[in-house]
Amino acid sequence: MKSSSFLPAYLLGILLFCIISCGDQTEAKDNTTADSALPDSSASPALTTPTSTFVTTPETMMFVIQKVADYDKWLTVYDDHDSVRLANGVHNYVIGYSTTDRTRIFVALKSEQVEKAKAFGKSADLKQAMQKGGVKGTPKVNVYNITFQDTGKITTNLRSQTTFTVKDWDTFQRSYDSARQERVDNGIMDRAYGHDADNNKKVSVVVAVVDTTKAYAFWKSDHMKELRKRAGVVGEPERFNFRIVKRY
């Protein structure tokens, strides 16, 4: 009697053991599948290539350097004249004034077409607006084909525009580009350069001055003279140092 009552209990124990064991195996299998679907956190992250801030697509720009009687009065007239500029395909870009004289002004404008910019630079509308704004003497108005720009953000608003003549544009460009790191090491960062719309031997360069002490020493150095000679620069460059005071 004792052995017959023990047998069902024994069989019941085996049955429970099988159920529990099978359940554990199913759960283990599900966990394995879920884990394999998760991303491998130990894998190396995808590398992204930094976006270059250099722009080498040519763009038409007009640079104007002028002397005015009063900067604030001139600026009011300049802003009121915006609709005329837009009608001639010319757009505001940057305004600055000399680091030593607030009444000597640098204006940079962008244009949709080189011929429109050239026509506007010689127009009666522009001459009248300049007279109204108190411009003294004859302003320097030049239209350039800007072939390089660095659009990266920098903290300094100090700029220097240099104009000069070269023997050959291609020779100058190769030589100038090869010395970019030297300029950086001496507190100078390229912002834009290009040549006159009608003559690629007349060059304009605009740089940011990050360290004035280094930059001025570099410009006056014998090494700079050697760099200019190597680039085929003819004569002495003309430099205008200014501070950007307004961007559009």
Image (tube, helix red, strand yellow):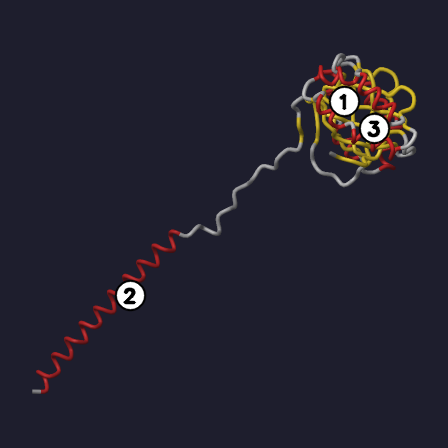
| Rendering coords of residue 186 (x, y %) | 81, 34
Q: In this view, does 56 lie to the left or right of 23?
A: right
- Give the residue drawn at x 76%, y 22%: 62
* Residue 130, image x, y percentages: 85, 23
Q: Which of 61 and 118 is in front in this view?
A: 118
Q: Which amino acid does label 1 sit on?
A: Met
Mark 2 and mark 3 lie on one chain; the one further toward the N terminus is: 2
User: Residue 225's image quarter?
Assistant: top right
Mark nearer the N terminus (1 vs 2)? 2
Q: In this view, does 26 lie above or below 55?
A: below
Q: Name the residue under label 2.
A: 24
Question: In the rendered image, which quarter is residue 216 located in?
Answer: top right
The residue pinned by badge 1 equals: 62
* Mark 2 Cα-neighbour bin, 10 Å: few <14, some 14–19, many ≥20: few
Name above or below for residue 151 compared with residue 45: above
Q: Can residue 231 be seen in this view?
A: no
Q: Is mark 3 on a helix, strand or loop?
A: strand
Mark 2 vs mark 3: give the one in front.
3
